[in-house]
Image (cartoon, rainbow, N blue to C red):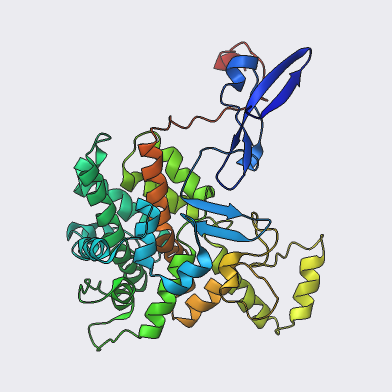
């Protein structure tokens, strides 16, 4: 017999189905609640609300578990590559050699972006934040590929949009950085792998030879894997709800980039570096700042420790930990990005590059499941009906 939950409202009693996930997670199905009872639930921040069922990522914050399609983040970071993980997230299985070679080749041949995008770049002030530039450039892809706007596009057409986006976002990200520092944009070099190509576009200058350090490229690859998906967080749920209106993949991902930009989400690793630099400028007294962090009346926040979801430790950070101190992944990624020579203004852009396959997978799953358009409810707390007073009598 199926398990149910009992809701009592006054003298009325209602049975609500309980949904059980593949990892024995349980949820009360309230999809018919308003129709049956006239009530809605109120859950600010959606902390206790499941917006969808998904087979992409399993996250258990209490036990510190993160798995992509059943594979542990530790195994994937150690044994896989970012593009292989991208394929896994988007299509559900690890590819064989032939399939992976075809997938990689398809991405490689789409790395070049339209020359007119340079005109868009020229319209931004040189001090524009790269995240704002990146979001705008990704959104502009709907103009360059208007066929992507068709909500009934074929599977092959959707896959083409996916390959284009995976290929072009690193080019756009690098160009956004070059715009910020006033350097000429570098074109992609398709002889290089995904991360090496990005690093060359980021750091090469016309006046000097540039050779990619394989250690740096490998470190970047691992960081992108660790950020590739994280279940229904702020930016991912944004991608799904925008996509639920049948907005194109490009428009949905652009919305996700904007959501990620916030300092409470993707900007956290930048905040870590800014915190550490502030401590250093103030004399480097760590004990002083630990005391400030413990003081509830002090506005100082210790960035990079703790997590809204993980109550034990962040398994993405476990990949780096040697001592039993468990900062979250933002603490490590911020430090490592700085060590790789990536400026703090680009940290959130790097996060977006890593999260891209997860966003794509979530958008694709939502569309394939034919999920309804997102439409949260509210409890109204404003004025009751008022009579209109003409302006001359106010």
How many callouts does the rendering have?
A: 0
Where's residue 180, x and y in %?
37, 69
Q: Is residue 306 above or below residue 344?
A: above
Name the residue rendered at 22%, 51% in the picture: 160
| Left or right side of 57 for 9 | right
The one of 165 and 128 positioned closer to us in this rendering = 165
Where's residue 95, x and y in %?
32, 60
Residue 27 in view: yes
| Left or right side of 384 for 373 | left
| Left or right side of 322 for 347 | left
The one of 254 and 42 positioned closer to us in this rendering = 42
Q: Quadrant of the N terminus?
A: top right
Name the quadrant containing residue 202.
Answer: bottom left
Where's residue 108, x and y in %?
22, 66
Q: Quadrant of the C terminus?
A: top right
Name the residue rendered at 56%, 13% in the picture: 390
Q: Is residue 387 above or below residue 161?
A: above
Name the quadrant containing residue 296.
Answer: bottom right
Where's residue 324, x and y in %?
70, 76
Q: Is residue 275 above or below residue 135?
A: below
Name the residue rendered at 25%, 34% in the picture: 152
The one of 311 and 149 positioned closer to us in this rendering = 311
Q: Is residue 332 above or below residue 29?
A: below
Residue 347 in view: no
| Left or right side of 237 for 38 | right
């Amino acid at each position: 017999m199926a398990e149910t939950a009992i809701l009592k409202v006054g003298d009325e009693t209602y049975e609500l189905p309980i949904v059980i996930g593949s990892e024995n997670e349980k949820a009360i199905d309230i999809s018919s609640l308003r129709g049956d009872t006239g009530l809605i639930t109120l859950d600010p921040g959606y902390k206790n609300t499941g917006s969808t069922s998904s087979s992409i990522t399993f996250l258990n914050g209490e036990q510190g578990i993160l798995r992509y399609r059943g594979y542990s983040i530790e195994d994937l970071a150690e044994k896989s590559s970012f593009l292989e993980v991208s394929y896994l997230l988007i299509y559900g299985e690890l590819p064989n050699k032939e399939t992976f070679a075809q997938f990689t080749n398809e991405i490689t041949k789409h790395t070049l972006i339209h020359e007119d995008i340079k005109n868009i770049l020229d319209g931004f002030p040189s001090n524009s934040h790269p995240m704002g530039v990146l979001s705008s450039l990704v959104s502009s892809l709907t103009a360059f590929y208007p066929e992507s706007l068709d909500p009934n596009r074929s599977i092959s057409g959707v896959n083409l949009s996916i390959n284009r986006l995976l290929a072009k976002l690193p080019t756009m990200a690098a160009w956004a950085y070059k715009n910020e520092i006033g350097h000429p944009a570098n074109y992609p070099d398709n002889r290089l792998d995904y991360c090496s190509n990005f690093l060359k576009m980021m750091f090469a200058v016309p006046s000097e030879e540039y050779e990619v350090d394989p250690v740096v490229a490998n470190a970047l690859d691992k960081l992108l894997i660790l950020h590739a998906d994280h279940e229904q967080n702020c930016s991912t749920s944004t991608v799904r709800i925008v996509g639920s209106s049948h907005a194109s993949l490009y428009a949905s991902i652009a919305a996700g980039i904007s959501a990620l930009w916030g300092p409470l989400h993707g900007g956290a690793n930048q905040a870590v570096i800014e915190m550490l630099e502030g401590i250093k400028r103030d004399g480097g007294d760590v004990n002083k700042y630990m005391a400030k962090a413990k003081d509830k009346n002090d506005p100082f926040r210790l960035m990079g420790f703790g997590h809204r979801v993980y109550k034990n430790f962040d398994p993405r950070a476990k990949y780096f930990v040697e001592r039993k101190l468990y900062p979250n992944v933002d603490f490590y990624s911020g430090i490592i990005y700085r060590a790789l020579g990536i400026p703090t203004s680009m940290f959130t852009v790097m996060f977006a590059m890593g999260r891209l396959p997860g966003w794509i997978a979530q958008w694709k799953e939502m569309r394939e499941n034919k999920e309804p358009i997102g439409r949260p409810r509210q409890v109204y707390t404003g004025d009751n009906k008022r009579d209109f007073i003409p302006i001359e009598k106010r």
